Image (tube, rainbow, N blue to C red):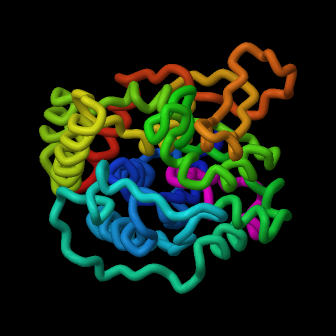
Amino acid sequence: MSVNQTKRKVILDCDPGHDDAIAILLAAKAPKVELVAITTVAGNAEVEKTTVNALKVCEIAGLSDVPVARGAGQPILRERRTAPDIHGDSGMDGPLLPQPTKSPVEEHAVDLIIRHLLASDGDITLVPVGPLTNIALAMRREPAIIPKIQEIVLMGGAMFGNTTPAAEFNIFVDAEAAKIVFESGVPLVMVGLDLTHQAMATPEIVERIAAIDNNVSTFVVELLNFFSDTYFHVFGFGGAPIHDACAIAYVNDPSVFTTIKRRVDIETKGEFTYGMTVVDLYGVTGREPNVEVADKLDQEKFWTMLCDALKQYS
């Protein structure tokens, strides 16, 4: 991983989603991130909705030159599952935004990912923060992209579950896709719930963002108010964890959290454990570690990074 280059080229694969929206906003202004493209996938809502939501966020952020490509609408094998209990029917309920004037590109997300990687010098990082369907399909369609991927920094997985007792949502939605990605040999950073639950937008954090007082920070506060409310009602949390922005934060500055190199395998057959990210914490299998597993978040560094990015919007 080249952490000393001025900016890291990123394709952000997402399913907006409140925390996805904040990830886009951070990626657009993070000083060491060059946002090459945004691709969408079914996850928090149907892909038609997540694509519209991505376009809305681009519009409020002024990202007219960043292409948005619509991707997979179904997991590879399983029935589609969405999260209206967390994100509302639209996938991004709460803020009232006009329909976007920006349109997605005609190219499918999988084709866009393949094209950019094949044309690259191996300097593109993929940041998937939804189900891994697009990434797995791209790898299957054109295996030549695999050695071209600088790194994959994904939001997903955990040593516990939020969708089942064993499985985190993004992995559970398409565990077959996750298995393909985790076994690809690409350098992987897993930013899972163990880490992202430390990025909790408490009322104090929301006040800090509100004090920035521009159009984008106001939008983020509206996102967080809705997101915090659903997290309280579903999980009893006193705030909303901004999962997806953590992955972008790592790309911008890896010192924002620590990682531990471990073997991680994806369970696709278990009756009660489908979608589990099986982390060999103590090395009991003797299998080669394949994933940097996010561990501890520097919370002040993270919130300062996000607030500094939001202050750059007018």
At 17% from the left and 42% from the top, the residue drawn is 212
Residue 151 visible here: no
Q: Position of residue 17 (x, y in %)?
A: 36, 55
Which residue is more in the foreground, 74 or 40? 74
Residue 22 visible here: yes
Q: Image height check: is 184 above or below 233?
A: below
Which residue is more in the foreground, 263 or 153? 263
Q: Position of residue 309 (x, y in %)?
A: 34, 44
Residue furthest front in the image:
271
At 44% from the left and 32% from the top, the residue drawn is 196
Q: Image height check: is 199 above or below 100?
A: above
Residue 279 vs residue 165: left or right? right
Q: Position of residue 180 (x, y in %)?
A: 75, 52
| 112 in the magenta segment | no
Residue furthest bottom in the image:
106
Q: Quadrant of the rendered structure where residue 209 is?
A: top left
Q: Position of residue 223 (x, y in %)?
A: 23, 50
Quadrant containing the C terminus in the rendered view: bottom left
Which residue is more in the foreground, 290 or 37? 290
At 35% from the left and 80% from the top, the residue drawn is 102
Question: Which span of residues is magenta-colored?
Answer: 117-134
| 128 in the magenta segment | yes
Quadrant containing the N terminus in the rendered view: top right
Which residue is more in the foreground, 16 or 209? 16
Residue 298 vs residue 175: left or right? left
At 55% from the left and 22% from the top, the residue drawn is 295
